[in-house]
Amino acid sequence: MKTVAPASETTRAPTIYEVAAKANVSIKTVSRVLNGEPNVRPGVQQRVLAAVAELGYRPKMSARGLAGGRSYTLVTFLDEGLTMDHWRIGRSNPYVERLQFAGMLQCRKAGYHLLVELLDPNSPRVEQWIQSTLAALNPDGVILTPPISEDQKIIALLEQFNAPFARLSAVPSKAACLTISMDEVAAAAEATNHLIDLGHTRVGFISGGPGFASSALREQGYRAALEGRGIAFDKKLMSIGDYTFEGGKRAAAILLKEKNPPTAIFASNDEMALGAIHEASRRGLAVPRDLSVIGFDDFPAAQYSIPPLTSMRQPIDDMGVLAVKRLIENAATQRGAAMPQDRAVVPHALVVRASTCPPPRSATPRKTKA
Amino acid sequence: MKTVAPASETTRAPTIYEVAAKANVSIKTVSRVLNGEPNVRPGVQQRVLAAVAELGYRPKMSARGLAGGRSYTLVTFLDEGLTMDHWRIGRSNPYVERLQFAGMLQCRKAGYHLLVELLDPNSPRVEQWIQSTLAALNPDGVILTPPISEDQKIIALLEQFNAPFARLSAVPSKAACLTISMDEVAAAAEATNHLIDLGHTRVGFISGGPGFASSALREQGYRAALEGRGIAFDKKLMSIGDYTFEGGKRAAAILLKEKNPPTAIFASNDEMALGAIHEASRRGLAVPRDLSVIGFDDFPAAQYSIPPLTSMRQPIDDMGVLAVKRLIENAATQRGAAMPQDRAVVPHALVVRASTCPPPRSATPRKTKA
DNA sequence: ATGAAAGCGCTAACAA
DNA sequence: TTGTTAGCGCTTTCAT
């Protein structure tokens, strides 16, 4: 019963039938082995595995997807407007890059694949769009990134279509999904305390983009830290940014123009922190000698800026890995059912580099070469 | 004959049968309309389109892939070692990011999807790995990035498996594939000439990574420009880098230590240029006042460095778009056959920013505030 | 110009 | 413990 493979010039992909034939078992048994199902004797399993190895066989995703309902595919939805803006200015997008790559690596371990899709929450036809995208891709899970992870309509839609999904967001949701976040408030407080510990009492704050829940939480942490250390909150030390480099520059400029300017600035993301540093040096201020700056996110650029940026690490890699892990787990055990409502908080960490030091007129009489 | 959709609580994805029923045609006709095949009367087409819109129907990728052989998927192969190194140090990878995103956007336009796969050309089982990956994904096309786009074994394997593929590489290949590149030599010469035009005669060069064909070509362009302007090539002005920030620093240090150091440095990529700038300021040299630095690639970081980096733009976006376009075109017309051997050169452009200016002791007596 | 029937390569019931 | 038989939702022949 041996089917001689046509020795064509170009190698053809083997099918499950060829593996079954070579191992002298039925295709179902091959399927069992490949999917780790029980009820296969070790000996048979060995034969099948050997045949698989010899043929270099790998089940075709489309066939599996069609027959089994599982696509072995996860999809990340990114906010279309935001992403395209980034793209057009030619800026890199570390959040997406890290998330995507971490997710991809985790997917690989399970034979999964990760796709990226852009989603415009303001389009009049989001519903249709989501439905048809889910239908076309039939993903085993969806990862929602900010700010669409905070969009109630999107969340409701995903729930309605019964898609298992994980939200990367600091705000909880009652929807049937996994919400992954870091403790934004505590992290922001720790960042602020780092500055206070250094001796700073006039600590400026640059807030983030409206539309991002994280922004308000980071501000909340900043204020909590101040209060906890008995430092009065000063409205003049707060400036509104938008999570961009330019916004950071503008916000810093306002702060630095004050008659009694801050000796340290906590920018609620790295890009703005870099903008603040830029603005400081533009005004002849040396960082950190004259002004300490701490960021938030600890994105790649933080380590290569001048000076290297002290920052609060957002564990985006870990979040991506966790999202993927849980989604795949869910697909494997719940057969496509929605995720049970759940929440996961991933630990953050302060990364001290060279952009923070005690204030100029502080107790520490540290001299810097003028 | 109307099948009433079960008004279940969770919306279910419609199939081609439902569309056909609603439009009163056979599923084959629906298929024709969806795939733009001929022999459909306008009226019928309208009916079908209306039904599709009403149902929010989108053909399921896996079904299409299984039945038609086309997967509507393209895959990019990245060098595994290189990519993982980048990843681990927490560096961003603009080349991949831009390529990936540009490709993804182009894919979207055609209903395609772009996947990323890591490929280790040194693994003893690359062949198996490639074969099984191609079998599993059944991509309509493959995009090869440097340095694996220059790996003869990989190229041969892809050709053997009959996969249509596009190489992003400066070196030609006789293989059945599309080779996309920029004119590295001309671009490097132009970058060098920019410096010479500014009045520099002692122009240093930092070469790139061994294993990248681009490196040798850029050096070639540098030497050609020198020769073209009657400037003698000086071995002492050449330093070996490795396309990394650190490598750029080290290479610049060697150049700057010379008794008669260069007044300008052409680093053969942006990362090294940034490293060179870093090294220069570490030695108390102001860029560009004391030392002009020009990069190559024009990656995002170039515009945000201090000072903003003058660089030769590598049109990586355009290359990605072109690769995707041609691969999809091929899939649509050649039904999975390999690409005809072809070559495409994408135009480059010099982007002048603030890291280059005339040399200190040049004709231009420009004063900078000390 | 349109439709009927036959798979694509798997997984999922259901037998044995 | 294993194999048989249906489909999954499409695209292809090949009729008509």
Image (cartoon, coloured by chain):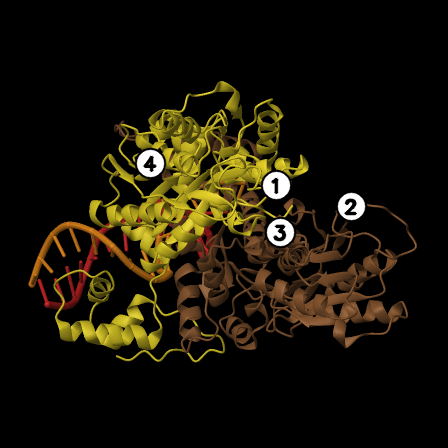
Chain colours: A brown, B yellow, C red, D orange
Q: Secondary structure at mark 4?
A: loop
Give coordinates of residue B352: x percent, y percent: 44, 47
User: For mark 4, what is the residue?
Assistant: B183
The quadrant in which the C terminus of chain A is found is: top right
Q: Nearer the viewer, residue A275 or B211?
A: A275
| Same-subunit check for callouts 2 and 3 | yes
Mark 3: which amino acid?
Val
Q: Output the chain of dot 4.
A: B
Give me the C-alpha separation between circle 2 and circle 1: 16 Å
Circles 2 and 3, Cβ within 8 Å, touching? The answer is no
Give the left or right position of residue B112, taking residue A241 as reference: left
Residue A209 appears in which quarter of the rendering? Answer: bottom right
User: For mark 3, what is the residue?
Assistant: A321
Q: Output the chain of dot 3.
A: A
| Same-subunit check for callouts 1 and 3 | no
Q: Secondary structure at mark 1?
A: loop
From the viewer's perspective, is residue A171 above or below residue B267? below
Q: Secondary structure at mark 3?
A: helix
User: Closer to the N terminus: mark 1 or mark 4?
Assistant: 4
| Same-subunit check for callouts 3 and 4 | no
Mark 4: which amino acid?
Asp
User: For mark 2, what is the residue?
Assistant: A370
Mark 2: which amino acid?
Ala
Q: Output the chain of dot 2.
A: A
